[in-house]
Image (cartoon, rainbow, N blue to C red):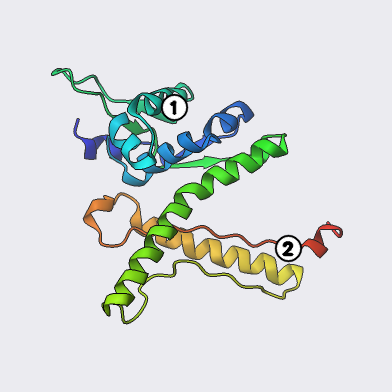
């Protein structure tokens, strides 16, 4: 079975809700490896992932085995010529129930781990744009690298905004389902939240 055929037979979502598994994924190296595999959706060796994450292949092999133990990624069949066996994701997407972990420090560690790949990408994009502007190559920004703001809303308006934003992201996620990232010019990462300010916490 080819990589494309295997991908078509993958389940849509691998759900992680057991607190023990949430703790395993919350390690920053494991989360970065997970992001790389799920983003690329193709077999990658520990050596290839290690080069992206910035650790040694042996360290990456250990963390991949930890992820493999919970089933979210798995090894392909061993190569006959003795080459390193690649790892592949066990689904097209994954979902982690961070709220299932009762310890706040673990939840915070997971959120920090989630931000590492995004920070790396934002920093790279910012450097590229600064260089492009310096050389006079960039006339308009094609992407939104980072945007922040404040909305003054009723509770009902905030819930409606959350629903509408989620629907927009989901619509574009559906467009990308089944596509190979390397075949398309834009592979956009996003993260968003709709949070109350501190003064609202006392009213919850």
Local SS, label 2: loop
Report the mark closest to the observer, 1 or 2: 1
- Name the side, left or right, on which 146 lies relative to 44: right
Q: Return the disc, 1 or 2, that comes first in the chain's sequence.
A: 1
Q: Is residue 45 visible?
A: no
Above or below, comparing residue 120 to residue 76 in the picture: below
Residue at point 19% right, 34% down?
2
- As drawn, the residue found furthest toward the right would be 202
- As drawn, the residue found furthest toward the left would be 81
In the rendered image, residue 40, in percent from the top left (x then y), is placed at 31, 45
- Name the side, left or right, on which 113 lies relative to 38: right
Question: Observer-nearest residue: 166 or 45?
Answer: 45
Above or below, comparing residue 180 to residue 42 in the picture: below
Q: Which mark is residue 63?
A: 1
Quadrant of res 204: bottom right
In the rendered image, residue 10, in percent from the top left (x then y), is placed at 35, 36
Residue at point 39% right, 70% down?
143
Local SS, label 1: helix
- Name the side, left or right, on which 174 lies relative to 47: right
Question: Observer-nearest residue: 128 or 19?
Answer: 128
Estimate how packed mark 2 is, as few (under 14), some (14 to 19) or many (20 or more) residues with alpha carbons within 10 Å: some
Estimate how packed mark 1 is, as few (under 14), some (14 to 19) or many (20 or more) residues with alpha carbons within 10 Å: many
Label count reads: 2
Question: Observer-nearest residue: 152 or 82?
Answer: 82
In the rendered image, residue 132, in percent from the top left (x then y), is placed at 30, 72
Position of the N terminus by quadrant:
top left
Q: Which residue is mark 2?
A: 196
Q: Is residue 139 visible?
A: yes
Residue at point 27% right, 80% down?
136
């Amino acid at each position: 079975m080819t990589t494309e055929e295997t991908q078509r037979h993958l389940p849509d979502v691998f759900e992680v809700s057991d607190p023990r598994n949430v703790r395993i994924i919350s390690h920053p190296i494991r989360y970065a490896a997970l992001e790389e595999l799920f983003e690329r959706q193709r077999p990658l060796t520990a050596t290839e992932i290690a080069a992206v994450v910035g650790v040694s292949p042996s360290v990456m092999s250990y963390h991949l085995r930890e992820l493999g133990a919970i089933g979210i990624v798995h090894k392909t069949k061993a190569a006959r010529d003795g080459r390193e066996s690649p790892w592949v994701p066990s689904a097209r997407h994954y979902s982690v129930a961070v709220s299932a972990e009762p310890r706040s420090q673990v939840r915070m560690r997971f959120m920090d781990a989630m931000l590492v790949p995004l920070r790396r990408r934002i920093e790279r994009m910012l450097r590229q744009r600064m260089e492009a502007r310096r050389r006079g190559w960039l006339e308009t920004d094609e992407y939104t690298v980072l945007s922040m703001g404040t909305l003054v809303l009723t509770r009902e308006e905030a819930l409606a905004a959350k629903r509408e934003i989620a629907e927009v992201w989901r619509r574009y996620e559906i467009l990308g389902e089944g596509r190979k990232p390397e075949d398309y010019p834009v592979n956009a990462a996003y993260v968003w939240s709709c949070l109350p300010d501190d003064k609202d916490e006392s009213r919850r």
